[in-house]
Image: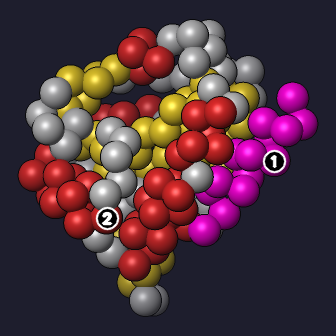
């Protein structure tokens, strides 16, 4: 599994959001983007991560950063997740794992002693030109925003 490094071009994508509308990386050109991958909507860790990002949206927006989540869930599941927690930012469906593979976040992981294939929770800070500023693999759900804001403060 190839891991992205700061300075790498962020792999392009276009995926449906929770409303079925296509969203692409190019839609965020000229803005910073906090892109995060999560295993499954409405599970404890994913809910913690999404709600932490929701609660920090005004702070992130004041820093010029948009937020975007990606999981293998279908748009209907993403929509329920968004509505249940009033997340208010795009959640994209990567059903075939193509984008997750391009970002190096689809792979082998252990859950409750079992080895499975799936999303390795990760987050990326992407700059205005579409380059990776920071990459955090195996990020803890509650740490995503703190890592991003710390990285933004250092620039």
Give yes or no for residue 141 being in the magenta stretch: no
Would residue 149 appear left or right of 92 to someone viewing this image?
right
* Residue 71 spot, x, y in % from top left: 32, 51
Magenta segment: 142-155
* Residue highlighted by disc 1: 150
Q: Is residue 143 above or below residue 70?
A: below
Would residue 46 appear left or right of 122 to someone viewing this image?
left
Give yes or no for residue 143 being in the magenta stretch: yes
Contact, mark 2 vs mark 1 (Cβ under 8 Å) = no
Residue 60 is drawn in which quadrant? top right
Would residue 136 appear left or right of 27 to someone viewing this image?
right
Q: For mark 1, does the 10 Å Cα neighbourhood hold few (<14), some (14 to 19), or many (20 or more) residues?
A: few
* Residue 63 spot, x, y in % from top left: 69, 32
Would residue 12 appear left or right of 76 to someone viewing this image?
right
* Residue highlighted by disc 2: 85
* Residue 67 spot, x, y in % from top left: 49, 39
């Amino acid at each position: 599994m190839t891991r992205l490094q700061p300075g790498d071009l962020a792999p392009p994508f276009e995926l449906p959001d929770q409303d079925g509308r296509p969203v692409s990386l190019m839609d965020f050109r000229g803005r910073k983007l906090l892109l995060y991958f999560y295993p499954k909507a409405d599970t404890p860790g994913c809910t913690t991560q999404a709600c932490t990002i929701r609660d920090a949206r005004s702070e992130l927006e004041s820093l010029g950063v948009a937020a975007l989540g990606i999981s293998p869930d279908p748009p209907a599941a993403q929509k329920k997740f968004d509505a249940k927690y009033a997340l208010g930012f795009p959640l994209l469906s990567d059903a075939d794992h193509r984008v997750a593979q391009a970002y190096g976040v689809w792979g082998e992981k252990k859950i409750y002693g079992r080895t499975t294939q799936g999303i390795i929770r990760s987050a990326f800070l992407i700059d205005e030109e579409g380059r990776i500023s920071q990459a955090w693999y195996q990020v803890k759900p509650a740490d995503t925003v703190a890592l991003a804001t710390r990285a933004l403060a250092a620039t």
